[in-house]
Amino acid sequence: MDNDRNAPATRGNLEDVQVELKHDIAELRAEIKAELKQEVGGLRAELKHDIAAVRQEAAGHRAEAKEDNALLRSEMQLMHDDLVERIRDSETKLLQAFYSFAESNQKRVSSVEEETAAIKSRLATVEERLTGVEKRLNMPPAA
């Protein structure tokens, strides 16, 4: 080809340019393909490494979660045991209060029964005396 840029292009010149372009395009494709293969290979290795790291981290989190779960269970069991103990203590205190009330109430009832018995005894004594007085006076007992 001439260096004259104003000269008309021939069909041969265009075919030569076309062949060169095809060759250049093929080379570019080969270069891009090689670079992409290399980058994809590197990315694949990085991805495998990252996946392995994520799996390892997830396994660590799983172990931590199991430990936390066990700790939580033991804390909940302690809280349950403490609650049961407090309920039992409350039951004991309530029962003691009821027993104290029942004892004092029983003393009152016994006292009332004793007083009733004493009153009945006195009434019986009064009736005997009245009967004795009626016998002396010969008065028939009132019905």
Image (cartoon, grey):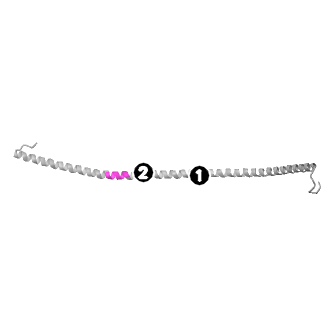
Q: Is residue 140 above or below residue 115?
A: above
- Number of the front mark, 1 or 2: 1
In this picture, residue 121 sits left or right of residue 17: left
The kind of residue on which mark 2 rests is Arg
Residue located 25% across and 50% down the image:
110
In this picture, residue 70 sits left or right of residue 16: left
Q: Main secondary structure of the magenta part?
A: helix
Q: Residue furthest right?
A: 2
In this picture, residue 111 sits left or right of residue 10: left
Residue located 48% across and 51% down the image:
81
Say if the magenta span includes residue 53. Answer: no
* Mark identifier at residue 67: 1
The kind of residue on which mark 1 rests is Glu
Residue located 47% across and 53% down the image:
82
Residue indicated by mark 2: 88
What range of the chain is rendered magenta? 94-101
- 26 or 93: nearer the viewer: 26
Residue 86 is situated, as x and y percent measured from the top left of the image, at 44, 53
Between the residue at mark 1 and the residue at mark 2, the CA separation in whole angstroms equals 32 Å
- 11 or 96: nearer the viewer: 11
Q: Quadrant of the N terminus?
A: bottom right
Q: Secondary structure at mark 1?
A: helix
